[in-house]
């Protein structure tokens, strides 16, 4: 595993655990905040981000995993 992959895996694990502590309402608010940030810092459209989020949920993962997934879409721009 490369250093970048290790950083991404650690960030994902941290975010997933962090978001798991949030209420459903807090997760919903956070979803829109992440969506806006990722759209403004990447070329991802709202539809693309929503599709990624939905696919993670459709595969049986919980909301905290889906939030962590979309939150890391702009990791390269933030580091």
Image: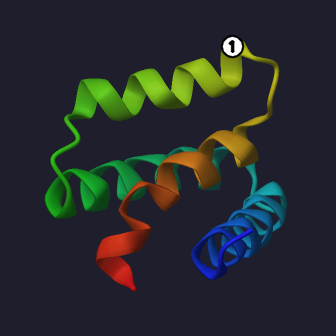
Q: Residue furthest top?
A: 58
Relative depth, front residue between 4 and 33: 4
Give the image quarter of residue 68.
Answer: bottom right
Judging depth in this view, the residue of 7 and 37 nearest the camera is: 7
Measured as percent of width and height from the top left, residue 55 is found at 58, 19
Label 1 sits on a secondary structure element that is helix
Q: Looking at the image, which residue sits at the far bottom? A: 79
Identify whether 32 is placed above or below 38.
Answer: above
Q: How is the image coloured?
A: rainbow
Q: Would you say 10 lies left or right of 8 here?
A: right
- Picture coordinates of residue 40 (x, y %)? 15, 59
Q: Is residue 39 left or right of residue 18?
A: left
Q: In this picture, is 72 found above or below 79?
A: above
Q: Is residue 33 above or below residue 56?
A: below
Q: Which residue is at a point 38% across and 48% down the rendered structure image?
A: 32
| Quadrant of the snapshot with the N terminus | bottom right
Residue at position x 73%, y 48% in the image: 64
The residue shown at (48%, 47%) is 31
Nearer to the camera, 9 or 22 = 9
State the image coordinates of residue 71 (x, y, percent, origin top left).
Answer: 50, 58
Q: Which residue is mark 1?
A: 58
Task: Indicate left or right for 78 with 41 as reference.
Answer: right
In the displayed structure image, the side of residue 47 where residue 79 appears, left or right: right
**For the residue carrying disc 1, how many other residues have a C-alpha within 10 Å: few (<14), some (14-19), or many (20+)?**
few
Snapshot quadrant of residue 18: bottom right
């Amino acid at each position: 595993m490369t250093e970048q992959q290790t950083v991404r895996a650690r960030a994902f694990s941290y975010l997933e655990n962090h978001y798991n502590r949030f209420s459903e309402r807090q997760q919903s608010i956070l979803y829109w905040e992440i969506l806006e940030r990722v759209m403004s810092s990447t070329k991802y459209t709202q539809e693309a981000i929503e599709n990624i989020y939905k696919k993670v949920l459709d595969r049986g993962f919980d909301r905290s995993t889906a939030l962590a997934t979309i939150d890391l879409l702009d990791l390269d721009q933030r580091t």
